[in-house]
Amino acid sequence: MIRLRANPLTESATLLRRIAVILGSLGLTAIYSLLVLGRAAIRRLDRRTVDAYTRGWSTTLLRMVRANLTVRGEVPDFGDGRRYIIVSTHASHYDIPITFVSMPGSIRMLAKKELFRIPLLGGAMKAAEFPSIDRHNRNRAVQDLARARAMMESGIVLWAAPEGTRSSDARLQPFKKGCFHLALDTEAVVVPMAIRGVHHVLQARSWKINLGQPVEVRVGSPIDTSGMTKEQLPELMARVREQMEELLGDGEAR
């Protein structure tokens, strides 16, 4: 179990505090993006450096809101030579830094194409080997998934949110198939993960921030897709969804 110590008191942030958190988060993201781009420009950017940057960025973001993070479950050894995809619930922007802090290894987010259009951040994500998926162009999506597979085979662990967008009430939405196709294509190990309580920190489509909120990451049982066929895609999706529902528990606790 990993614990990020923080103020245990939960309180709604004042307007000034919300503004400070938002501006601080944007400034922090810009700084780390510049660091990545600067090192890439002089050819001194490697995965170990990117890992340190993503965890430094994430830790600071969580400290800004005094998130009280706990991780439960057995975290796999991502360095055992197999390909891994972490499949997670998605109810807040904070899911991303929470994953970087709580999971070991070279974690990279399977990102929407739109994120790469954001100034500084988009270029930094590209330099840091974040794979992208163009959901609106099928041929392009196939190429993007092929690149993502190559990254996995070189040691990167992908984090994906199969719901595609953030859930406003923390309940699981319908799954998209992209990351599951990728898992079967690469015979990856799928690691279901649920993040409980994160929507209370910053709910989807809201600017209300709660400070000192307890957040719990629950890691499920890995599902090895070796030997599984395309015809078993619905079965794989159903198994992952069943685990994620169980990890989330009752709606009141989320």
Image (cartoon, rainbow, N blue to C red):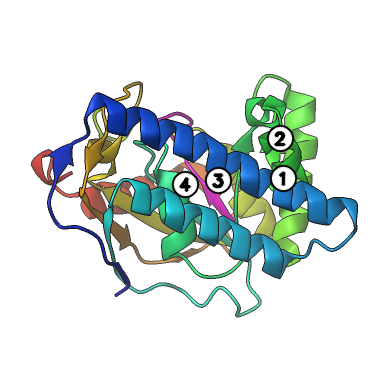
Residue topped by disc 2: 120
Q: Is 166 included in the stretch rendered in magenta?
A: yes
User: Please, what is the three-letter code of the amino acid marked with disc 4?
Assistant: Ile
User: Please, what is the three-letter code of the amino acid marked with disc 2?
Assistant: Leu
Instruction: Find residue 85 and report its horizontal and vertical position in percent.
Output: 55, 57
Depth order, front residue of 235/104: 104
Query: Residues under labels 4 and 1: Cα distance?
Result: 19 Å
Placement of the C terminus among the 4 image quadrants: top left
Q: Earlier in the sequence, mark 4 or mark 3?
A: 4
Query: Residues under labels 1 and 3: Cα distance?
Result: 33 Å
Residue 136 sits in which quadrant? top right
* Dot label at residue 96: 4
Instruction: Find residue 191 and report its horizontal and vertical position in percent.
Output: 45, 60
Residue topped by disc 1: 34
What segment carries the magenta color?
Answer: 158-168
Q: Secondary structure under badge 4?
A: helix
